[in-house]
Image (cartoon, grey):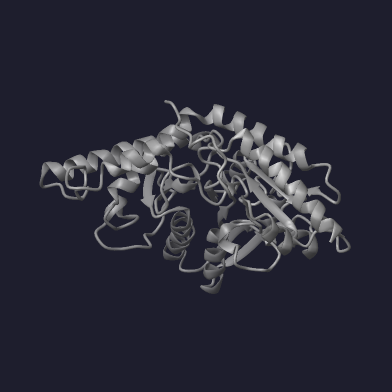
Amino acid sequence: MTLTPPPANIRKPVYLDYAATTPVAPQVAAKMAECLTLEGNFANPASRSHMLGWQAEEAVEHAREQVAVLIGADTREIVWTSGATEANNLALKGAAENYRILHKAGGHIVVSAIEHKAVLDPASWLEAQGFAVTRVQPNHEGIITAENLQAALRDDTFLVSIMQVNNELGCINDIKSLAAICKSRGILFHCDAAQSAGKIAIDVKDLGVDLLSLSAHKFYGPKGIGALYVRRAADVKIAAQIHGGGHERNMRSGTLATHQCVGMGESAELAQNNLVGDAQRITELRDLLWHGIADLPNLKRNSTSSQCVSGILNVAFVQDESHGCDGEMLLLSLRDLAVSSGSACNSASMSPSYVLKAIGLNDTQAQASLRFSVGRYTTREEIEFAIEHIRSVVMKLMKS
């Protein structure tokens, strides 16, 4: 399947924030458009009394199969959600509610300290409801080690949630090893795969996870649609958090948006078919960017160069409080680049990134750090322009 890139000419600002969101692939947008109007496949997929409803249901189920193939799951294990945030909430709150129903008490949950807020905030909410929560610290590369996880587990631990790829650093956790530790102790394992799906190969059976969250807009699908993988097994039960009709096998009620499901399915198939080629080209462009700025004074690479997803480069433009660039001024000065100072969900906050603080950066270094994220439609010309622009801005700021 051939990918259709945008025009080759450079548009400003150059978009280097693919970790925040990706543009919808043209093929995906075309498929979605076919499900919106009277002439298309617009009917309610839950309407089983006429052919138009059956056709919509068929399109949704085909999309469910496409998503299942991307992660090596059974189609019956895919539950549609509005995105990874809802999927994470359903996984954590659903597992916790089911545990409380069975045990008449709150138990113990383990998360990593550098999870996305879509995991950390539900964990804090559950803590306020009487559940105990342990937040495991990463090593200096942002990795959650098996030793640290083991040390956090208790006799009443029933759920562990650790992301596969960190959204700020791009570091990749060894989910298979971490999940195996939990399986040996009968503990449910949830993985937020929003930043890894469509970028690295995922096989949920091989990983050994029980629950896994996905978001379409991270791999060139539409916003507002995601999925939760729920392993089909007697010991994997989650309580619904949205009620009203018993959709999605009573795990998530609500009329399914056919066009969004179709969009996620098509983007999943595109990602699966282009997984290797995308990763190789994006890695080359990310490395080109790093090597083009690496000799700038007082620069520090926060993201590891080895155990890291292809598209993310996190860089601190200051070594200490007295040497380097002012982070806010740097971001404002790079007006010809669309980049991020961290997670898009925290972009309005002036507080230093809790992720960067957790791996040992001080406040000054964390606030002077930027995340560059490269994607499918990034061109070599754009990277070369970005290098020139970054070098020019940094050298001017260093002299001022």
* Name of the residue lying farthest toward the left: 50
Q: Is residue 23 left or right of residue 183?
A: left
The answer to which of 57 and 384 lies nearer the viewer is 384
Q: Residue at x 56, y 61 (%)?
A: 345
Point out the residue furthest to the right here.
322
Q: Position of residue 310 (x, y in %)?
A: 63, 37
Instruction: Give residue 128's position: percent from left, percent from top.
Output: 54, 74
Q: Nearer the viewer, residue 12 or 289?
A: 12
Question: Which residue is located at x 71 percent, y 39 percent?
Answer: 289
Q: Find residue 231 and report its image quarter.
A: top left
The quarter of the image holding the C terminus is bottom right
Numbered-mark total:
0
Tell me what residue is drawn at x 72 percent, y 42 percent.
387
Q: Hey, which residue is sitting farthest front in the picture?
A: 9
Q: Position of residue 119 (x, y in %)?
A: 55, 59
Is residue 357 visible to us here?
A: no
Residue 182 position in % (x across, y down): 59, 47
Vertical position of residue 393 compared to residue 134: above or below: above
Quadrant including the N terminus: top left
Please say whether residue 16 is visible from this viewpoint.
yes
Side of 256 relative to 67 (left or right): left
Q: Is residue 106 left or right of residue 155?
A: left
> What residue sits 29% from the left and 58% below the top?
254
Locate residue 204 relative to residue 134 in the image: left or right. Answer: left
